[in-house]
Amino acid sequence: MLQRAQDLGTRVLQQQKWWILLLLVVLAVLPLFASRFVLHILLLFFLYVTLAESWNLLAGYTGYINFGHVTFMGIGAYTSLILMKDFGLSPFYTCFLGGLFAAITAVVIGYPLLRLRGPYFAVSMLSLSFIFTALAFNLSGLTEGGRGISVRPFPSKVPFYYFMLVCAVISVGAIYKISRSKFGLGLISIREDEEVADSLGVNTTLYKILAFAGSAVLPGIVGGIYGYYMSYMDPKAAFSFSFTLNSIVMCMLGGSGTVLGPIIGAVILRSMSEFVSYLIPGEFYKLLVGALFIGLILYLPGGIMSLFAGKEGSDVFAKR
Amino acid sequence: MSLLKGEGVCMDFGGLKAVHNVDFEVREGEIVGLVGPNGAGKTTLFNVISGYYAPTAGKVRFNGQEIQGVKPFQICRMGIARTFQVPRPLLKLSVFTNILAACLFGRSEAAAAVDHRAEVERIMDFLDLNELRDTPAANLNVAQRKTLEVGRALATAPRVILLDEVVAGLNPMETDRLMQKVQQIRDSGVTLFFVEHVMRAVMSISDRIYVLNFGEKIAEGTPQQIAGDPDVIEAYLGKGVHSA
Protein backbone atom coordinates (compact mmCIF):
# COMPACT_ATOMS: atom_id res chain seq x y z
CA MET A 1 0.00 0.00 0.00
CA LEU A 2 2.74 2.38 1.03
CA GLN A 3 4.74 1.24 -1.95
CA ARG A 4 1.85 2.08 -4.25
CA ALA A 5 1.46 5.50 -2.66
CA GLN A 6 5.13 6.19 -3.26
CA ASP A 7 4.84 5.02 -6.88
CA LEU A 8 1.96 7.44 -7.31
CA GLY A 9 4.01 10.23 -5.78
CA THR A 10 6.89 9.59 -8.16
CA ARG A 11 4.52 9.40 -11.12
CA VAL A 12 2.84 12.68 -10.28
CA LEU A 13 6.24 14.31 -9.94
CA GLN A 14 7.35 13.03 -13.33
CA GLN A 15 4.09 14.15 -14.89
CA GLN A 16 4.60 17.56 -13.36
CA LYS A 17 8.05 17.63 -14.87
CA TRP A 18 6.55 17.09 -18.32
CA TRP A 19 3.88 19.70 -17.71
CA ILE A 20 6.50 22.22 -16.70
CA LEU A 21 8.55 21.40 -19.80
CA LEU A 22 5.46 21.70 -22.00
CA LEU A 23 4.60 25.07 -20.45
CA LEU A 24 8.12 26.32 -21.09
CA VAL A 25 8.02 25.15 -24.71
CA VAL A 26 4.68 26.91 -25.22
CA LEU A 27 6.07 30.10 -23.67
CA ALA A 28 9.19 29.82 -25.81
CA VAL A 29 7.36 29.53 -29.16
CA LEU A 30 4.58 31.97 -28.21
CA PRO A 31 6.19 35.07 -29.80
CA LEU A 32 5.70 33.37 -33.21
CA PHE A 33 1.92 33.64 -32.85
CA ALA A 34 1.02 36.04 -30.07
CA SER A 35 0.00 39.66 -30.49
CA ARG A 36 2.10 42.51 -29.16
CA PHE A 37 -0.47 43.02 -26.42
CA VAL A 38 -0.16 39.44 -25.16
CA LEU A 39 3.62 39.69 -25.20
CA HIS A 40 3.41 42.93 -23.22
CA ILE A 41 1.17 41.35 -20.58
CA LEU A 42 3.37 38.27 -20.28
CA LEU A 43 6.67 40.07 -20.07
CA LEU A 44 5.33 42.26 -17.28
CA PHE A 45 4.18 39.07 -15.57
CA PHE A 46 7.69 37.60 -15.86
CA LEU A 47 9.13 40.83 -14.48
CA TYR A 48 6.90 40.57 -11.43
CA VAL A 49 7.62 36.88 -10.90
CA THR A 50 11.32 37.75 -10.85
CA LEU A 51 10.80 40.59 -8.38
CA ALA A 52 8.51 38.56 -6.11
CA GLU A 53 10.76 35.48 -6.08
CA SER A 54 13.83 37.53 -5.26
CA TRP A 55 11.94 39.33 -2.48
CA ASN A 56 10.96 35.86 -1.30
CA LEU A 57 14.61 34.84 -0.83
CA LEU A 58 15.25 37.50 1.80
CA ALA A 59 11.78 37.77 3.36
CA GLY A 60 10.21 34.35 2.92
CA TYR A 61 13.29 32.28 3.64
CA THR A 62 15.56 34.50 5.72
CA GLY A 63 12.84 36.44 7.56
CA TYR A 64 13.97 39.96 6.65
CA ILE A 65 11.03 41.98 5.33
CA ASN A 66 12.32 44.41 2.72
CA PHE A 67 10.24 47.52 1.98
CA GLY A 68 12.82 48.88 -0.44
CA HIS A 69 13.15 46.07 -2.94
CA VAL A 70 12.65 48.45 -5.88
CA THR A 71 16.01 50.07 -5.04
CA PHE A 72 17.86 47.25 -6.78
CA MET A 73 15.63 47.44 -9.82
CA GLY A 74 16.13 51.21 -10.02
CA ILE A 75 19.90 50.83 -9.76
CA GLY A 76 19.79 48.34 -12.62
CA ALA A 77 17.59 50.60 -14.74
CA TYR A 78 19.81 53.64 -14.30
CA THR A 79 23.02 51.67 -14.86
CA SER A 80 21.81 50.36 -18.19
CA LEU A 81 20.22 53.55 -19.48
CA ILE A 82 23.17 55.75 -18.51
CA LEU A 83 25.57 53.38 -20.28
CA MET A 84 23.34 53.43 -23.34
CA LYS A 85 22.94 57.20 -23.37
CA ASP A 86 26.61 58.04 -22.76
CA PHE A 87 28.39 55.17 -24.45
CA GLY A 88 25.82 53.69 -26.79
CA LEU A 89 26.05 50.26 -25.17
CA SER A 90 22.99 48.04 -25.52
CA PRO A 91 21.19 47.25 -22.25
CA PHE A 92 20.89 43.66 -23.44
CA TYR A 93 24.58 43.41 -22.52
CA THR A 94 24.96 46.00 -19.80
CA CYS A 95 21.97 44.80 -17.76
CA PHE A 96 24.31 42.27 -16.13
CA LEU A 97 26.45 45.15 -14.94
CA GLY A 98 23.27 46.55 -13.34
CA GLY A 99 22.78 43.24 -11.55
CA LEU A 100 26.37 43.39 -10.33
CA PHE A 101 25.99 46.97 -9.06
CA ALA A 102 22.75 46.03 -7.30
CA ALA A 103 24.49 43.11 -5.58
CA ILE A 104 27.45 45.29 -4.56
CA THR A 105 25.03 47.86 -3.15
CA ALA A 106 23.32 45.07 -1.19
CA VAL A 107 26.63 43.92 0.31
CA VAL A 108 27.69 47.44 1.26
CA ILE A 109 24.41 48.48 2.86
CA GLY A 110 23.62 45.00 4.13
CA TYR A 111 26.56 44.98 6.49
CA PRO A 112 25.16 47.77 8.69
CA LEU A 113 21.45 47.34 7.95
CA LEU A 114 21.12 43.59 8.43
CA ARG A 115 21.86 44.07 12.13
CA LEU A 116 18.40 45.59 12.36
CA ARG A 117 15.45 43.27 12.66
CA GLY A 118 11.74 43.24 11.98
CA PRO A 119 10.13 46.62 11.31
CA TYR A 120 13.43 48.47 11.78
CA PHE A 121 14.99 46.72 8.82
CA ALA A 122 11.83 47.15 6.75
CA VAL A 123 11.67 50.89 7.39
CA SER A 124 15.39 51.43 6.87
CA MET A 125 15.09 49.76 3.46
CA LEU A 126 12.11 51.97 2.63
CA SER A 127 14.27 54.98 3.52
CA LEU A 128 17.04 53.65 1.32
CA SER A 129 14.73 53.63 -1.71
CA PHE A 130 13.87 57.27 -0.93
CA ILE A 131 17.56 58.11 -0.66
CA PHE A 132 18.18 56.62 -4.09
CA THR A 133 15.21 58.54 -5.51
CA ALA A 134 16.76 61.74 -4.15
CA LEU A 135 20.16 60.78 -5.59
CA ALA A 136 18.62 60.18 -9.00
CA PHE A 137 16.94 63.61 -8.86
CA ASN A 138 20.07 65.44 -7.77
CA LEU A 139 22.96 63.78 -9.61
CA SER A 140 21.60 65.40 -12.76
CA GLY A 141 24.93 65.31 -14.59
CA LEU A 142 24.61 61.54 -14.61
CA THR A 143 20.87 60.91 -14.45
CA GLU A 144 19.40 64.02 -16.15
CA GLY A 145 17.57 64.62 -12.84
CA GLY A 146 13.80 64.99 -12.93
CA ARG A 147 13.72 65.19 -16.74
CA GLY A 148 14.63 61.56 -16.89
CA ILE A 149 16.67 59.63 -19.44
CA SER A 150 15.20 58.88 -22.83
CA VAL A 151 16.79 56.34 -25.14
CA ARG A 152 15.91 55.19 -28.63
CA PRO A 153 13.37 52.37 -28.26
CA PHE A 154 14.12 48.91 -29.58
CA PRO A 155 11.76 48.10 -32.45
CA SER A 156 10.60 44.66 -31.28
CA LYS A 157 9.11 43.33 -28.04
CA VAL A 158 10.38 39.82 -28.66
CA PRO A 159 13.90 40.05 -27.15
CA PHE A 160 12.43 41.74 -24.05
CA TYR A 161 9.96 38.92 -23.77
CA TYR A 162 12.68 36.26 -23.88
CA PHE A 163 14.93 38.16 -21.50
CA MET A 164 12.17 38.48 -18.91
CA LEU A 165 11.13 34.86 -19.41
CA VAL A 166 14.67 33.62 -18.79
CA CYS A 167 15.02 35.81 -15.70
CA ALA A 168 11.74 34.51 -14.29
CA VAL A 169 12.71 30.89 -14.94
CA ILE A 170 16.13 31.44 -13.36
CA SER A 171 14.59 33.09 -10.29
CA VAL A 172 12.12 30.23 -9.78
CA GLY A 173 14.78 27.60 -10.43
CA ALA A 174 17.22 29.29 -8.06
CA ILE A 175 14.65 29.49 -5.27
CA TYR A 176 13.77 25.83 -5.82
CA LYS A 177 17.41 24.78 -5.58
CA ILE A 178 18.20 27.04 -2.63
CA SER A 179 15.14 25.97 -0.67
CA ARG A 180 16.44 22.39 -0.73
CA SER A 181 20.09 23.14 -0.05
CA LYS A 182 22.29 23.52 3.00
CA PHE A 183 22.40 27.25 2.28
CA GLY A 184 18.61 27.34 2.29
CA LEU A 185 18.41 25.48 5.59
CA GLY A 186 20.81 28.03 7.07
CA LEU A 187 18.55 30.86 5.88
CA ILE A 188 15.43 29.16 7.25
CA SER A 189 17.18 28.67 10.61
CA ILE A 190 17.91 32.40 10.68
CA ARG A 191 14.26 33.12 9.94
CA GLU A 192 13.06 30.81 12.69
CA ASP A 193 15.46 32.05 15.38
CA GLU A 194 18.60 33.95 14.50
CA GLU A 195 20.35 33.52 17.87
CA VAL A 196 19.71 29.81 17.84
CA ALA A 197 20.99 29.54 14.26
CA ASP A 198 24.16 31.27 15.46
CA SER A 199 24.53 28.87 18.39
CA LEU A 200 24.08 25.90 16.03
CA GLY A 201 27.02 27.03 13.92
CA VAL A 202 25.38 29.07 11.16
CA ASN A 203 27.52 32.05 10.11
CA THR A 204 24.48 34.32 10.26
CA THR A 205 26.19 37.55 9.14
CA LEU A 206 27.61 35.91 6.03
CA TYR A 207 24.41 34.05 5.17
CA LYS A 208 22.25 37.15 5.52
CA ILE A 209 24.53 39.19 3.29
CA LEU A 210 24.63 36.42 0.68
CA ALA A 211 20.83 36.20 0.72
CA PHE A 212 20.55 39.97 0.45
CA ALA A 213 23.01 40.16 -2.45
CA GLY A 214 21.29 37.20 -4.10
CA SER A 215 17.94 38.93 -3.83
CA ALA A 216 19.43 42.03 -5.52
CA VAL A 217 21.02 40.48 -8.63
CA LEU A 218 17.95 39.61 -10.72
CA PRO A 219 16.04 42.82 -9.90
CA GLY A 220 19.15 44.69 -11.03
CA ILE A 221 19.16 42.78 -14.33
CA VAL A 222 15.44 43.05 -15.08
CA GLY A 223 15.58 46.72 -14.06
CA GLY A 224 17.91 47.41 -17.00
CA ILE A 225 15.75 45.40 -19.40
CA TYR A 226 12.59 47.11 -18.16
CA GLY A 227 14.18 50.57 -18.49
CA TYR A 228 15.14 49.81 -22.09
CA TYR A 229 11.68 48.40 -22.75
CA MET A 230 10.07 51.63 -21.54
CA SER A 231 12.91 53.55 -23.33
CA TYR A 232 12.56 56.13 -20.56
CA MET A 233 13.40 56.33 -16.86
CA ASP A 234 12.91 59.08 -14.33
CA PRO A 235 13.57 58.88 -10.56
CA LYS A 236 9.93 58.37 -9.64
CA ALA A 237 9.36 55.60 -12.15
CA ALA A 238 12.65 53.82 -11.45
CA PHE A 239 12.24 53.77 -7.66
CA SER A 240 8.43 53.58 -7.54
CA PHE A 241 7.11 52.03 -4.34
CA SER A 242 4.49 50.17 -6.36
CA PHE A 243 7.12 47.64 -7.54
CA THR A 244 8.02 46.92 -3.93
CA LEU A 245 4.39 46.69 -2.89
CA ASN A 246 3.56 44.36 -5.76
CA SER A 247 6.49 42.08 -4.91
CA ILE A 248 5.36 41.89 -1.30
CA VAL A 249 1.67 41.32 -2.00
CA MET A 250 2.33 38.73 -4.72
CA CYS A 251 4.70 36.83 -2.49
CA MET A 252 2.44 36.94 0.56
CA LEU A 253 -0.71 36.20 -1.40
CA GLY A 254 0.77 33.03 -2.85
CA GLY A 255 2.74 32.15 0.26
CA SER A 256 6.15 33.52 1.22
CA GLY A 257 8.81 30.96 1.94
CA THR A 258 7.48 28.67 -0.81
CA VAL A 259 8.71 28.20 -4.38
CA LEU A 260 5.31 28.37 -6.10
CA GLY A 261 3.74 31.05 -3.90
CA PRO A 262 5.14 34.12 -5.69
CA ILE A 263 4.12 32.69 -9.09
CA ILE A 264 0.55 32.10 -7.92
CA GLY A 265 0.46 35.57 -6.39
CA ALA A 266 1.79 37.14 -9.60
CA VAL A 267 -0.79 35.31 -11.75
CA ILE A 268 -3.65 36.47 -9.53
CA LEU A 269 -2.49 40.03 -9.06
CA ARG A 270 -1.56 40.60 -12.70
CA SER A 271 -4.85 39.18 -14.00
CA MET A 272 -6.72 41.24 -11.44
CA SER A 273 -4.86 44.37 -12.44
CA GLU A 274 -5.53 43.92 -16.18
CA PHE A 275 -9.15 42.96 -15.62
CA VAL A 276 -9.98 45.72 -13.14
CA SER A 277 -8.12 48.37 -15.14
CA TYR A 278 -10.15 47.29 -18.17
CA LEU A 279 -13.45 47.66 -16.28
CA ILE A 280 -12.57 50.76 -14.26
CA PRO A 281 -9.72 52.73 -15.81
CA GLY A 282 -7.39 54.73 -13.61
CA GLU A 283 -5.88 54.01 -10.23
CA PHE A 284 -8.79 52.06 -8.78
CA TYR A 285 -6.75 48.87 -9.02
CA LYS A 286 -4.27 50.13 -6.42
CA LEU A 287 -7.07 50.46 -3.91
CA LEU A 288 -7.85 46.80 -4.42
CA VAL A 289 -4.20 45.79 -3.91
CA GLY A 290 -4.13 47.69 -0.64
CA ALA A 291 -7.35 46.09 0.55
CA LEU A 292 -6.06 42.66 -0.46
CA PHE A 293 -2.87 43.22 1.51
CA ILE A 294 -4.79 44.09 4.69
CA GLY A 295 -7.13 41.14 4.24
CA LEU A 296 -4.19 38.81 3.72
CA ILE A 297 -2.36 39.81 6.88
CA LEU A 298 -5.56 39.44 8.89
CA TYR A 299 -6.95 36.20 7.52
CA LEU A 300 -4.32 34.30 5.56
CA PRO A 301 -0.83 35.31 6.70
CA GLY A 302 0.64 32.11 5.23
CA GLY A 303 -0.82 32.79 1.77
CA ILE A 304 -2.58 30.41 -0.59
CA MET A 305 0.13 27.76 -0.33
CA SER A 306 -0.54 27.42 3.40
CA LEU A 307 -3.96 25.97 2.51
CA PHE A 308 -2.20 23.03 0.86
CA ALA A 309 0.41 22.35 3.54
CA GLY A 310 -0.62 19.26 5.49
CA LYS A 311 -0.34 18.94 9.24
CA GLU A 312 3.21 17.76 8.75
CA GLY A 313 4.06 21.20 7.40
CA SER A 314 6.21 21.76 4.36
CA ASP A 315 9.59 20.64 5.63
CA VAL A 316 11.41 19.36 2.54
CA PHE A 317 14.53 18.35 4.45
CA ALA A 318 12.85 15.59 6.45
CA LYS A 319 11.87 13.64 3.32
CA ARG A 320 13.40 10.18 3.41
CA MET B 1 43.32 17.96 31.76
CA SER B 2 41.47 21.24 31.87
CA LEU B 3 39.09 21.54 28.92
CA LEU B 4 37.21 24.70 29.83
CA LYS B 5 38.68 27.29 32.14
CA GLY B 6 37.59 30.73 33.32
CA GLU B 7 40.02 33.19 34.85
CA GLY B 8 38.54 36.20 36.65
CA VAL B 9 35.52 36.36 34.35
CA CYS B 10 33.49 39.57 34.81
CA MET B 11 30.34 40.57 33.00
CA ASP B 12 28.88 43.99 33.79
CA PHE B 13 25.66 45.39 32.41
CA GLY B 14 25.88 49.09 33.12
CA GLY B 15 26.32 49.18 36.88
CA LEU B 16 25.12 45.64 37.41
CA LYS B 17 27.82 43.06 38.00
CA ALA B 18 26.03 39.99 36.70
CA VAL B 19 29.18 37.89 36.93
CA HIS B 20 32.08 39.09 39.03
CA ASN B 21 35.59 37.72 39.07
CA VAL B 22 34.62 34.07 38.65
CA ASP B 23 37.25 31.35 38.23
CA PHE B 24 36.18 27.93 37.14
CA GLU B 25 37.64 24.84 35.57
CA VAL B 26 35.97 21.92 33.83
CA ARG B 27 38.19 18.94 33.17
CA GLU B 28 37.81 16.50 30.31
CA GLY B 29 35.22 13.83 31.06
CA GLU B 30 33.70 15.54 34.11
CA ILE B 31 30.13 16.44 34.91
CA VAL B 32 30.29 19.81 36.64
CA GLY B 33 27.23 21.45 38.15
CA LEU B 34 26.65 25.19 38.40
CA VAL B 35 24.04 26.19 40.96
CA GLY B 36 22.88 29.29 42.73
CA PRO B 37 19.71 31.22 43.53
CA ASN B 38 17.77 33.05 40.81
CA GLY B 39 19.76 35.93 39.38
CA ALA B 40 23.09 34.52 40.53
CA GLY B 41 24.60 34.88 37.05
CA LYS B 42 24.58 31.25 35.93
CA THR B 43 23.01 31.79 32.52
CA THR B 44 25.08 34.94 32.03
CA LEU B 45 28.22 32.90 32.60
CA PHE B 46 27.01 30.39 29.99
CA ASN B 47 26.30 33.23 27.58
CA VAL B 48 29.87 34.44 28.05
CA ILE B 49 31.32 30.98 27.43
CA SER B 50 29.20 30.39 24.34
CA GLY B 51 30.09 33.76 22.84
CA TYR B 52 26.85 35.72 23.22
CA TYR B 53 28.62 38.22 25.44
CA ALA B 54 32.24 39.23 25.38
CA PRO B 55 33.26 39.37 29.06
CA THR B 56 34.00 42.81 30.50
CA ALA B 57 37.15 41.36 31.99
CA GLY B 58 38.82 38.02 32.40
CA LYS B 59 39.60 35.12 30.14
CA VAL B 60 37.84 31.97 29.01
CA ARG B 61 40.03 29.19 27.72
CA PHE B 62 38.96 26.14 25.77
CA ASN B 63 41.62 23.51 25.38
CA GLY B 64 44.17 26.13 26.39
CA GLN B 65 43.08 28.60 23.69
CA GLU B 66 41.50 31.94 24.65
CA ILE B 67 37.93 32.13 23.33
CA GLN B 68 36.44 35.23 24.93
CA GLY B 69 34.89 37.44 22.23
CA VAL B 70 34.79 34.66 19.63
CA LYS B 71 31.43 34.50 17.82
CA PRO B 72 28.85 31.91 18.89
CA PHE B 73 28.87 29.99 15.60
CA GLN B 74 32.65 29.64 15.77
CA ILE B 75 32.53 28.55 19.41
CA CYS B 76 29.99 25.92 18.45
CA ARG B 77 32.25 24.62 15.68
CA MET B 78 35.21 24.53 18.08
CA GLY B 79 33.29 21.98 20.13
CA ILE B 80 31.26 23.85 22.74
CA ALA B 81 27.54 23.17 22.34
CA ARG B 82 24.80 24.70 24.44
CA THR B 83 21.14 24.23 25.20
CA PHE B 84 18.73 27.01 26.08
CA GLN B 85 16.98 27.34 29.43
CA VAL B 86 13.67 27.98 27.69
CA PRO B 87 13.85 25.59 24.72
CA ARG B 88 14.12 27.40 21.40
CA PRO B 89 13.42 24.91 18.63
CA LEU B 90 13.17 26.10 15.03
CA LEU B 91 9.39 25.94 15.24
CA LYS B 92 8.33 25.32 11.65
CA LEU B 93 10.93 22.64 11.05
CA SER B 94 10.57 19.00 11.98
CA VAL B 95 12.51 17.34 14.78
CA PHE B 96 14.69 15.69 12.13
CA THR B 97 15.50 18.97 10.39
CA ASN B 98 16.22 20.78 13.67
CA ILE B 99 18.90 18.22 14.43
CA LEU B 100 20.06 18.14 10.80
CA ALA B 101 20.73 21.89 10.90
CA ALA B 102 22.96 21.46 13.95
CA CYS B 103 24.71 18.53 12.29
CA LEU B 104 25.32 20.37 9.00
CA PHE B 105 26.49 23.67 10.44
CA GLY B 106 27.78 23.06 13.95
CA ARG B 107 30.65 20.67 13.34
CA SER B 108 34.34 21.32 13.00
CA GLU B 109 35.74 20.51 9.58
CA ALA B 110 37.24 17.32 10.95
CA ALA B 111 33.89 16.11 12.31
CA ALA B 112 31.84 17.25 9.31
CA ALA B 113 32.80 14.42 6.99
CA VAL B 114 30.00 12.05 7.93
CA ASP B 115 26.69 10.92 6.51
CA HIS B 116 24.70 13.69 8.16
CA ARG B 117 21.30 12.10 7.72
CA ALA B 118 22.44 8.81 9.25
CA GLU B 119 24.02 10.73 12.08
CA VAL B 120 20.73 12.51 12.77
CA GLU B 121 18.82 9.21 12.74
CA ARG B 122 21.35 7.78 15.20
CA ILE B 123 20.89 10.72 17.59
CA MET B 124 17.09 10.51 17.36
CA ASP B 125 17.39 6.79 18.09
CA PHE B 126 19.51 7.45 21.18
CA LEU B 127 17.10 10.07 22.54
CA ASP B 128 13.93 8.11 21.63
CA LEU B 129 12.80 10.85 19.27
CA ASN B 130 12.09 8.47 16.35
CA GLU B 131 8.34 8.67 16.58
CA LEU B 132 8.50 12.46 16.44
CA ARG B 133 10.82 12.51 13.44
CA ASP B 134 8.51 14.43 11.10
CA THR B 135 6.62 16.42 13.73
CA PRO B 136 7.07 20.20 13.46
CA ALA B 137 8.91 21.36 16.58
CA ALA B 138 6.03 23.75 17.31
CA ASN B 139 3.88 20.74 18.23
CA LEU B 140 6.26 19.33 20.86
CA ASN B 141 5.61 19.45 24.61
CA VAL B 142 8.17 20.79 27.08
CA ALA B 143 9.87 17.46 27.76
CA GLN B 144 10.20 16.76 24.05
CA ARG B 145 11.53 20.25 23.39
CA LYS B 146 14.14 19.86 26.13
CA THR B 147 15.17 16.53 24.64
CA LEU B 148 15.42 18.15 21.22
CA GLU B 149 17.74 20.78 22.69
CA VAL B 150 20.03 17.98 23.84
CA GLY B 151 19.76 16.30 20.43
CA ARG B 152 20.79 19.45 18.62
CA ALA B 153 23.72 19.94 20.96
CA LEU B 154 24.84 16.35 20.39
CA ALA B 155 24.57 16.73 16.63
CA THR B 156 27.36 19.32 16.61
CA ALA B 157 29.80 16.60 17.76
CA PRO B 158 30.80 18.66 20.81
CA ARG B 159 33.58 18.07 23.31
CA VAL B 160 31.66 19.88 25.99
CA ILE B 161 27.96 20.67 26.32
CA LEU B 162 26.63 23.54 28.40
CA LEU B 163 23.24 22.36 29.65
CA ASP B 164 21.07 25.19 30.94
CA GLU B 165 18.34 23.81 33.24
CA VAL B 166 17.69 20.85 31.04
CA VAL B 167 15.27 19.14 33.44
CA ALA B 168 13.57 22.18 34.98
CA GLY B 169 9.82 21.87 34.58
CA LEU B 170 9.85 18.14 33.90
CA ASN B 171 8.05 15.58 36.07
CA PRO B 172 10.18 13.15 38.11
CA MET B 173 9.86 10.37 35.56
CA GLU B 174 10.91 12.61 32.67
CA THR B 175 13.72 14.01 34.80
CA ASP B 176 15.11 10.56 35.56
CA ARG B 177 14.94 9.53 31.92
CA LEU B 178 16.75 12.63 30.68
CA MET B 179 19.34 12.48 33.48
CA GLN B 180 20.05 8.91 32.48
CA LYS B 181 20.68 10.09 28.92
CA VAL B 182 22.94 12.85 30.22
CA GLN B 183 25.03 10.29 32.08
CA GLN B 184 25.22 8.14 28.96
CA ILE B 185 26.43 11.18 27.02
CA ARG B 186 29.18 11.69 29.60
CA ASP B 187 30.09 8.01 29.39
CA SER B 188 30.49 8.43 25.63
CA GLY B 189 33.29 10.90 26.36
CA VAL B 190 31.53 14.28 26.23
CA THR B 191 32.23 16.69 29.07
CA LEU B 192 29.23 18.37 30.69
CA PHE B 193 28.86 21.69 32.45
CA PHE B 194 25.33 22.24 33.61
CA VAL B 195 23.13 24.74 35.36
CA GLU B 196 20.33 23.17 37.35
CA HIS B 197 17.84 24.03 40.04
CA VAL B 198 16.59 20.51 40.53
CA MET B 199 18.87 19.53 43.44
CA ARG B 200 18.11 15.84 43.18
CA ALA B 201 19.57 15.89 39.68
CA VAL B 202 22.58 18.04 40.55
CA MET B 203 23.55 16.08 43.64
CA SER B 204 23.18 12.70 42.00
CA ILE B 205 25.25 13.12 38.87
CA SER B 206 27.80 15.92 39.44
CA ASP B 207 31.44 15.20 40.03
CA ARG B 208 31.96 18.73 41.26
CA ILE B 209 29.76 21.76 41.82
CA TYR B 210 30.27 25.52 41.65
CA VAL B 211 27.92 27.79 43.58
CA LEU B 212 27.28 31.35 42.44
CA ASN B 213 25.47 34.04 44.40
CA PHE B 214 25.00 37.65 43.23
CA GLY B 215 27.50 37.02 40.45
CA GLU B 216 30.28 35.75 42.69
CA LYS B 217 31.53 32.26 43.30
CA ILE B 218 30.82 31.40 46.94
CA ALA B 219 31.72 27.72 47.00
CA GLU B 220 33.08 24.81 45.01
CA GLY B 221 33.57 21.16 45.73
CA THR B 222 31.98 17.74 45.67
CA PRO B 223 28.21 17.46 46.19
CA GLN B 224 28.80 16.45 49.84
CA GLN B 225 31.08 19.42 50.52
CA ILE B 226 28.59 21.79 48.92
CA ALA B 227 25.61 20.42 50.83
CA GLY B 228 27.37 21.11 54.14
CA ASP B 229 28.85 24.50 53.24
CA PRO B 230 27.50 27.23 55.57
CA ASP B 231 27.79 29.96 52.88
CA VAL B 232 25.72 27.88 50.47
CA ILE B 233 23.07 27.18 53.09
CA GLU B 234 22.93 30.87 53.87
CA ALA B 235 22.61 31.84 50.22
CA TYR B 236 19.67 29.51 49.75
CA LEU B 237 17.93 29.64 53.13
CA GLY B 238 19.19 32.80 54.82
CA LYS B 239 21.00 33.08 58.17
CA GLY B 240 19.58 30.86 60.88
CA VAL B 241 18.25 32.80 63.90
CA HIS B 242 19.93 30.51 66.39
CA SER B 243 23.25 30.22 64.67
CA ALA B 244 25.85 32.41 66.30
Image (spheres, rainbow, N blue to C red):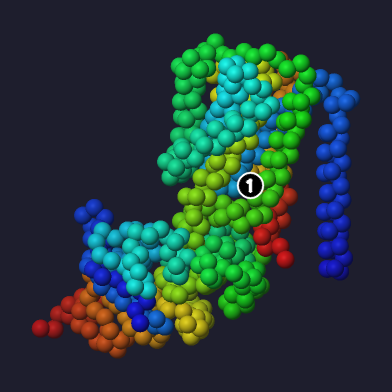
* Residue positioned 54% across, 29% down in the render: A71
Left or right side of A222 for B236: left
> Residue type at mark 1?
Gly
Q: Is residue B203 above or below residue A67?
A: below
* Residue B237 image offset from top left, x and y in percent: 24, 77
Residue B194 is drawn in which quadrant?
Answer: bottom left
Left or right side of A67 for A155: right
* Residue positioned 68% across, 45% down in the render: A174
- Is residue B97 visible to us here? yes
Q: Is residue B76 above or below residue A133?
A: below
For this orientation, the residue located farthest to the top is A147
- Is residue B143 visible to us here? no
* Residue B189 image offset from top left, x and y in percent: 47, 82
* Residue positioned 76% across, 26% down in the render: A159
Q: Which residue is mark 1?
A: A257
Left or right side of A295 for A123: left
What element does badge 1 sit on?
Answer: loop
Q: Quadrant of the C terminus of chain A?
A: bottom right
Residue B23 is drawn in which quadrant?
Answer: bottom left
* Residue B4 image offset from top left, x and y in percent: 35, 74
For this orientation, the residue located farthest to the bottom is B224
Left or right side of B71 for A95: right
